Image (cartoon, grey):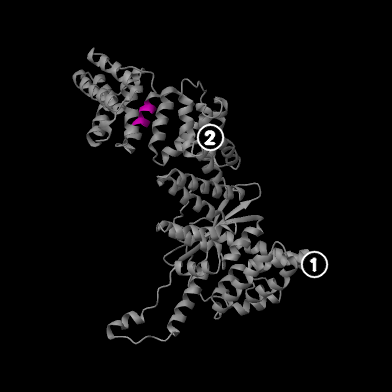
Amino acid sequence: MRLLPTILAAVVFLGCQTTPPDYRALTEQFEAGDEVSPGRVREAFLSADDLPARMERLNDLEAQALAVVDDEPLKLGSIGSAILDTYIGSLTGHFVLARFYDHVSNPKADFHERWVDRIQADMEAAGDGSSEQPYPAVTPVEARMYALSKNWNPVGSIYQGKDDNFSLLLLVRPEERPVKDLVFDLSPLYDTMREEFNAAAKRMPRKSKQPDDEAAQDREPDFTPFTLIGYLAKRNDTAAQAAVGAYLAQQRQLGDAVDWLRAASRTGNLMANLLLADIFRAQAQVAEDDAIREKAMDQVMENYLHAIALGSADAMYALGVLYLNGHYGEDNRISGVPLLKQAAALDYSDATVFLAHLHYAGEVVDKDLDAARRLYAESAAQGNDLARKSYARFLLDREAGQPGDARAVEWLEELAEDGEPESMLLLGNLHARGVGTRQSLRRAVGYYKQAVKQAPTDPNIVNEVAWTLAVSDQHDLRRERYARDIMDHLMDSNGEARERPEYLDTWAATYAATGDFERAVSLQQQAVDVAREAEYETVLDILVEHLEAFNAGETISEAVP
């Protein structure tokens, strides 16, 4: 998860240029019991002549409703009525009145529940809650009430703005489900505040000015989304406090950022805890003093634990990885496993694939290939790209002795359609071996060439393809001259690759495969020299063995892929 959020642009919906409906006329129809559209009511409200005054009153009343909605239902009657007197299409007003009337067993609850359903449907027709298609909302409280009306618990929030767009990212926790993101377009609130700001600035007496200052004096003062965020932050709005903290952290003003984020976290804002954990983790990474590093890591743990208590699978995974990587001591590495399992139970696919890796390697947990297979497939089915590629490599591992799985081919084909080169390489390996699909060396070579064409300077992709096509014990799979050509291109264009013994080894093997043993010996000697200088003892023996083979005029043949 991105812990320091990117500023998202809200989507602006442009309707046809028609005269907006009259809000007072629609109010009269509503009060007369006529059927009116929630969307038209919202449009009319936002076009009302007295919108600034109504918006100010609406924000205050809805804030009061939010403060008592869970614990004091008897207070909701008067507040809800006042909200609807201000804006008859308020989701907040109808939601709290439905609760009030239900509490006192009054059948009027049904009327307001129907309006809640209709407003929900209208919002969902206009967007899907993504950053590209946010739900429309008149106020920040309406966004939170939308979540409550769906029986989702709001657990974090942050405002986001760019140019003249303004939105709220709301983290909500459905019952026994992972936390999810919802984005709400709050452009109406921003536009209203900007107009009021500009009008107030124009009413202020102007200072005496010199002639060359006249143009500057005539310009409207700057009002940006951050102006509104700063105003809301000073009114203890937790989403605004989180946004200010995130901005200050990006500006490296970490002390002030921590203060703002701690203020937001005191109201149970999950986003603030995640941001704080990110800041302290960065501080720990650069700390030279062990005591300072330990103190920062304690803060990381504390904030992740707060986030975990609010249901964050991101925090479960992040803290679990820290444990497993030994950041809290070797003896505590095992503590990361239950955290990963907790996140995986919430369908957090990164945690699931990490658990698969652990069982595959037998690290921290017992080696269990059946568990690894099940977990790789589960994460891959959830759409995790890393899991899909890792599962294919797991199936191709001869020592693991796993049967094929046709789904692995299908999942990789989806990635390949998007131009992902490693998936193309793996498809080549699966087809070359006939793992999960009918063996086809022709198709295998086709996928290998697609992978190289997609990433001609990626040393990992090129090296693996070249090695396979130069030394495979399936002689009909070999394409020795092609393998040499792609290695020539890679090594001529990549100075770092020429310093890596494994790439030099492949390069030498391609020359041996095409009969140029003099060149192969020269390149292989470079590989041996580099490995010795870098003290790569684990690979030195095999490099020397290859050098001896090339000196004897022999090629390399291996069971690859």
Closer to the camera in the image, 289 or 469: 289
Residue 236 location, x and y as percent?
Answer: 56, 66
- Residue 297 numbered mark, or none: none
**Looking at the image, do the residues carrying marks 1 and 2 touch, with CB atoms under 8 Å apart?**
no
In the picture as drawn, the residue positioned furthest to the top comes out as 552
Left/right placement of residue 294 relative to residue 67 reads left
Q: Which residues are magenta?
A: 442-448
Relative to 70, is 448 above or below? Answer: above
The residue indicated by pointer 1 is 106
Q: Quadrant of residue 456?
A: top left
Q: Secondary structure at mark 1?
A: loop
- Whether residue 386 is situated above or below residue 478 in the rendered picture: below
Query: Which residue is located at x 57 percent, y 79 percent?
Result: 53
Question: Of helix, strand and loop, which mostly describes the magenta segment?
Answer: helix
Q: Amino acid at mark 2?
A: Arg
For the residue carrying disc 2, how many other residues have a C-alpha within 10 Å: few (<14), some (14-19), or many (20+)? some
Q: Nearer the viewer, mark 1 or mark 2?
A: 2
Q: Secondary structure at mark 2?
A: helix
User: Which mark is first along the chain, 2 or 1?
Assistant: 1
- Vertical order, 299 against 43 (above or below): above
Is residue 216 within the magenta segment? Answer: no
Q: Which amino acid lies under the numbered mark 1 shown in the image of this protein?
A: Asn
Residue bearing the label numbered 2 = 333
Identify the residue at horizontal 50%, vertical 74% (top origin): 193
Q: At which x and y percent is residue 559? A: 39, 18
Question: Label 1 crowding class (10 Å Cα cut-off): few <14, some 14-19, many 20+?
Answer: few
**Residue at the spot 49% in from the left edge and 61% down from the top edge:** 243
State the quadrant of the C terminus. top left
Q: Kindly indicate the quadrant of the structure image that contains residue 555.
A: top left
Residue 2: image location, x then y, percent: 47, 50
Task: Using the numbered discs, state the Cα–Cα distance from disc 1 to disc 2 in whole angstroms.
Answer: 57 Å
